[in-house]
Image (cartoon, helix red, strand yellow):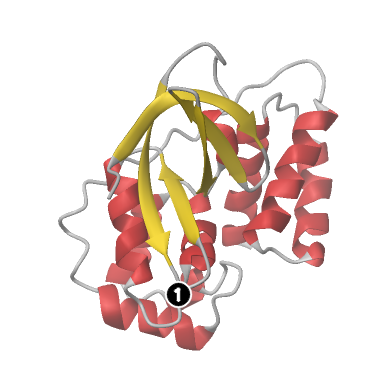
């Protein structure tokens, strides 16, 4: 079982990244691939989880050990698979997620794609009181601003939302709001979009 891999991120797509380690490219499905879009010549550490099924083997990547542990906790919930867990983790306010579970805030949880009321209630039932051992660090909410909108970055962010399972209507709704911003990075666009979708 892998704990983490250290290498160069050579490919970033809306659904996954490829991490090259000693000449081998590992495809890692991640909640927000654009968080790993850094200097292509700089090694990065990505925590990983290997899921083995009858028909395939998948690797999932995380920015830190805490995010990986939260992913594993979500997988223990009946009705939550890897794709749903990644969609939940894509909103980087993990502290808000833990707070919602602790406070039985089912409405907050149903804002994630593929999470209905019944599944949200199951998340609370299965995880309430069991997340205290995870030291979650909430990412900064400040975003880069610039004089012009980077339409390529916006397109990538919208594609990432679709890859996470958000409906076309949801993507279209936030696209209009994002287009008015002066953000310059895909990661910042995606973070803003996820905040808008969970606050709606």
Identify the residue at the far bottom of this view.
118
Q: Nearer the viewer, residue 76 or 119?
A: 76
Exactly how many numbered labels are in the figure?
Answer: 1
Q: Residue 109 appears at what percent x and percent y?
A: 48, 71
Q: Residues within 10 Å of mark 1 (few under 14, many from 20)?
A: some
- Residue drawn where x is 71% and y is 42% of the image: 157
Identify the residue at the far top of this view.
41
Q: Residue 67 appears at what percent x and percent y?
A: 34, 48
Say which residue label 1 marks. 80
Where residue 71 sits, quadrant-wise, is: bottom left
- Residue drawn where x is 36% and y is 67% of the image: 74
Q: Nearer the viewer, residue 88 or 57?
A: 57
Quarter of the image containing the C terminus? bottom right
Q: Nearer the viewer, residue 143 or 67?
A: 67
Q: Residue 39 appears at what percent x and percent y?
A: 55, 14
Picture layout, residue 168 above or below residue 49: below
- Residue drawn where x is 46% and y is 46% of the image: 92
The answer, for residue 142, to whether it is visible in the render is no
Where residue 185 sits, quadrant-wise, is: top right
The answer, for residue 169, to whether it is visible in the render is yes
Q: Residue 23 appears at what percent x and percent y?
A: 49, 23
**In the visual, does 90 lie left or right of 74?**
right
Q: Which element is circle 1 on?
A: loop
Picture layout, residue 194 above or below residue 99: above
Identify the residue at the far left of this view.
133
- Residue drawn where x is 15% and y is 55% of the image: 133
**In the visual, does 34 lie left or right of 69?**
right
């Amino acid at each position: 079982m892998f704990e983490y891999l250290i290498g160069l991120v050579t490919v970033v797509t809306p659904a996954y990244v490829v991490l090259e380690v000693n000449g081998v490219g590992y495809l890692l499905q991640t909640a927000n691939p654009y968080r790993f879009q850094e200097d292509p010549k700089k090694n990065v550490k990505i925590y990983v989880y290997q899921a083995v099924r009858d028909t395939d083997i998948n690797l999932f990547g995380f920015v830190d050990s805490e995010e990986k542990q939260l992913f594993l906790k979500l997988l223990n919930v009946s009705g939550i698979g890897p794709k749903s867990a990644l969609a939940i983790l894509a909103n980087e306010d993990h502290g808000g997620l833990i707070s919602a579970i602790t406070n039985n805030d089912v409405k907050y949880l149903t804002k994630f794609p593929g999470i209905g009321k019944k599944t949200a209630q199951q998340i609370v039932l299965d995880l309430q009181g069991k997340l205290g051992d995870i030291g979650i660090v909430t990412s900064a909410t400040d975003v880069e601003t610039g004089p012009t909108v980077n339409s390529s970055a916006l397109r990538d962010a919208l594609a990432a939302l679709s890859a996470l399972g958000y409906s076309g209507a949801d993507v279209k709704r936030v696209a209009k709001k994002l287009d008015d911003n002066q953000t310059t990075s895909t990661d910042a666009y995606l973070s803003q979009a996820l905040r808008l979708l969970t606050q709606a």
